[in-house]
Every structure is written in structure tokens, then in C-alpha cells.
Amino acid sequence: MSTLHNIKEVFSHVRYVAIALPIAFVVLAFAVWLPNWRLLHTILVSHDVEFIDATKVAFGLFGSLSTNFTLVSATYTILIAILFGINIAMLVYYVQRRKGSLRGKGATAGVGGLVAGVFGIGCAACGTFLLSVVLALIGAGGLLAFLPLGGEEFGILGVVLLLYSVYWTAQKIDEPLVCVAETN
């Protein structure tokens, strides 16, 4: 069977859609809220801000995808969230189908995709937020200036790694549950 057929098979079950969507939301929320963590912390711990108002502010920050992110960074941020949700749902399907005999290659690419994507999270104003903080800690913040896309390469790499992980997992779904013996 084809990769696309296997992806359709996984997501024909509501259970796996119910796994993918909240995970994608959490990853996207992390990407949007991370640059604004001080604001969120302030309104969440303030006794002067009603819970409903704090919730409105938190969800209003999703609008920053169209205002604070470049088109490229907003696109790969959304793609990373969606692909990570798809990846986790497919891995759950695969593991359940295999009853726990998962080989680590696809899972590693998926986690690698998320990590690379997280380092690429940023907006037009602050650039690659997390990567610049980490590089500044080791005195290498200026290195981002030498990258052709100013660090957005990490987000693009995250998308590529997650696509590979989804592809790899979809391919593995069709493999037999037992090794096929070669006959001479």
C-alpha cells in the first residue's frame, strides 16, 4: 500500500484524529505563547485579571501568527504543529498495531523535527526566539546573522524531519508483523 493510503487509514479512525488535534494545538500554543511567557505569567498570577479575560488574552495571542511572524516562520510553525500531531497519532497507531515492537528511527526523526522546529520558533520582531537565547548563553548569538535565513533554517529543518518521520512511519505500517524467511 502507499504512504498516503496508510495515512488515510490511520485517520479514518476518530481516535487518532482525537490524538493528533490536541497535540497539534499544544505545540502551536507553545510556539505562540513562548515569546510572550512574561505577559502570560503576569496576567495568570494577577488577582486583578479575571480568568475569562486572561483566557481571552491567551487565545488572542494566536493572532500574532499573522502580525509578529513572517510568512515563512508562521507557515513552518503551523506545519510543525500539524505534522507533530500527525506523527504522534501515527506512532500510537503503529505501536498499537505492533504491540510495542517499535524501532527508534522514525520516533527519533519526529522528536528531532520537534526540537529543530522549537529552535526555529520566532517572530518578525525577535527572530528565532529560543535559538537566539541558547546561542547567547554560549556567546554565539551573532552566528544567526551568518545564516542565509537568519535562523529560520531550523524551522524548515523541523518540517523536513517531521515529514520524513510521518513518511517512515506510514511505510512501516505495512511491514509484516513477523520477519519473512528467505527460501533458497
Image: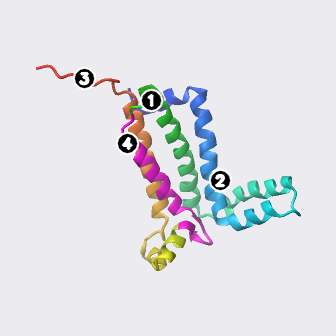
Whether residue 20 can be seen here? yes
For label 4, the residue is: 104
Secondary structure at numbered mark 3: loop
* Residue drawn at x 52%, y 46% as measured from the top left: 84
For badge 2, the amino acid type reads Ala
The region drawn magenta spans 102-130
For badge 1, the amino acid type reads Asn
Tell me which label, 4 or 2, sits earlier in the chain.
2
Badge 2 crowding class, 10 Å Cα cut-off, few under 14, some 14 to 19, many 20 or more, is: some
Q: CA distance from mark 4 to mark 2?
A: 27 Å
**Seen in the image, is 27 located left or right of residue 134?**
right
Contact (Cβ within 8 Å) of mark 3 with mark 4: no
**Seen in the image, is 24 located left or right of residue 60?**
left
Badge 4 crowding class, 10 Å Cα cut-off, few under 14, some 14 to 19, many 20 or more, is: few
Tell me which label, 2 or 3, sits earlier in the chain.
2
* Residue drawn at x 48%, y 68% as measured from the top left: 151
